[in-house]
Image (tube, rainbow, N blue to C red):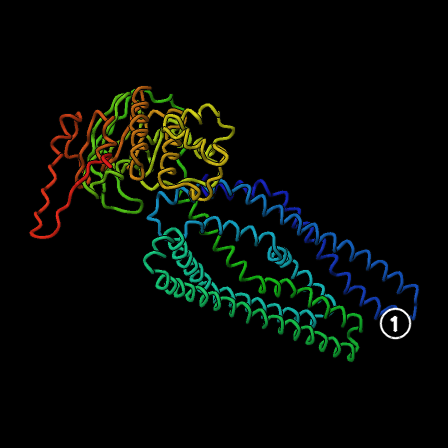
Amino acid sequence: MSPNLASYRFIRSNAGALVAVALVSGAANVLTLSGAVFMMEVYDRVLPSHSLPTLVGLGLVVLLLYAFLGLFDLLRARILVRVALRLDETLNAVVFRSTVRRALLSSGDGDGMQAQRDLDQVRAFLSGSGPGALFDLPWMPIYLAVCFAFHPWLGLTTLAGALILIAVTGLTELLTRGAAQQAVAAGMAREGVSQASRRNAEVVEAMGMGGRLCAIWGEANARFLKHQRSTSDVSGGFGALSKVLRMALQSAVLAVGAYLVIDGQATGGIMIASSILTGKALGPVDLAIGNWKGFVAARQAWRRLKETLRTTRPTAQTMKLPAPRARLSVEAAATAAPGGQVLLVDDVSFALDAGSALGVIGPSGSGKSSLARMLVGVWPARRGKIRLDGASLDQWDPDQLGPHVGYLPQDVELFAGTIEQNIARFGAAPDPDAVIAAAQAAGVHEMILRLPGGYNCQIGHGGAALSAGQRQRVALARALFGSPFLVVLDEPNSNLDTEGEAALSRAIQGVRDRGGVVVVVAHRSSALAPADFILAMKDGRVQSFGRKDEVLPNFQRPTPAMPRVAAGPSLTVVPAGAV
């Protein structure tokens, strides 16, 4: 969904609610005149006549009007809260998907959760008192007109005060805009340091990096607080100034009214009513200035939100394609890291038929993991095509392609929940037989049964309740869930013991037997045992591709002999299992 379309849909779906808010605000502002009219009647009618029944009657009427005023204010607040919730309901799924996609399309700099916080900021503003002040501002001319009707001098005095307060509002906008933007940028930098330190807590603690990282975070936090303090100081200072100006203006209106009463041009009731109306006329301006910080923050959040939705616009709706069953082909494909321009994989071409297994080898930095990401569509091909049964990956809807792809990344990440949910990819009401079949294919079924709760075992955030090897094997079962046609495994045996490696070999062979295609990126040769093809990479390019027995011997070198030690005790090597 594009940002403009999302905005249009939101406004259109809430047009009735916004009209209702405007009508309720109008009724409330009309009823606000009750206090001024009541005071005018008391001074001009009740006091001269000493009529107690008139006073009681006026009091009952004004109490009834105040009750309706409170009701209308309550209705407006409740409607605005529901409009804010409707905004969240309209955009939360889009924002979440955009947050995930942004992690794939950007270099990872900044705060990845900023879009969701922006949505929270806009929702909080809409459900607060700020929008009410904006709906009240158009009624300021009505109050001014009533003051002019009382006497031109009263209207001119009120108008002069309104212009001064509007100028204060403009200065508030100009002086807080830059500081607010800098505060957001500093907050994102601070959050980035915090998240990186949390993700690498073990490294930070083990190597004594906590003090330095704390200092870096402290510097970022100081910049954030500095800009936030500047914004608060400006908005708070002008808020105090506007309050003083409004009180001074009310006193000025009283003074002008008193002069008119002395001169016989107005009554005492008009004098008091004009002072009350001045406060009501300038109240929304005062409230708007007081909420200006929130308004600026919400406006900037909405702009960032629209930019996020624009830059991470999802792929267009595509026709559903038949499940791939025959062939994976890579045609002169190239890719680069998100936000990068240097090609990490360039001009890679090969094809695999159903039932094949490819082992990808090469030195570190040769582009093996980048190739794996490109094959599953995590990193889109900058050039060339990745095709499944002739259809390129960009012709697939990601949610429709997902069930046909199994992916085990080099850095395994599980989600908080049960083992069953993780294996089933958090699908709604997954088939228990399919979950168990995937676990058995990965050779992890027995291990899961030994855990507390079995498949219902809660593994915590990131799979913290499991060891590294257990996480890798559960992630392998997740990759095999649903019998996907293409299975891509990046260093799948990096944390596995001998039993786990044997289960991995059986899982790869199982995919081949059922007619799938497997691509295995590996440094250790044990993961290549079930492969029938080998692709060797160097500097992001294909160095060799062919059948395993033809390619692999050319890349196997004998281990250099250990140098002889001139002196010292001898070392006897005991064969494994002899003890």
Residue depicted at 53% across the width and 62% down the height: 293
- Could you tell me the amino acid type at mark 1? Leu
Instruction: Say which of 496 and 236 sits in front.
Output: 496
Residue 466 at x, y = what percent? Answer: 41, 41
Q: In the image, is 536 to the left or to the right of 390?
A: left
Residue 34 at x, y = what percent? Answer: 77, 61
Instruction: Say which of 466 and 176 sits in front.
Output: 466
Q: In the picture shown, does residue 376 fall above or below 291?
A: above
Secondary element at image label 1:
helix
Residue 336 at x, y = what percent? Answer: 26, 42
Q: In the picture shown, does residue 234 fall above or below 1?
A: below
Residue depicted at 26% across the width and 23% down the height: 356
Q: On the rendered image, what quadrant is the C terminus found in?
A: top left
Q: Quadrant of residue 224?
A: bottom left
Residue depicted at 67% across the width and 49% down the height: 78
Q: Is residue 232 visible?
A: yes
Q: In the picture shown, does residue 212 fall above or below 125?
A: below
Residue depicted at 6% across the width and 51% down the height: 566
Q: Quadrant of residue 403?
A: top left
Q: Quadrant of residue 560?
A: top left
Q: Which residue is mark 1?
A: 47
Numbered disc total: 1
Instruction: Say which of 260 and 304 sits in front.
Output: 304
CA neighbours of label 1 inside 10 A, class few (<14), some (14 to 19), many (20+)? few
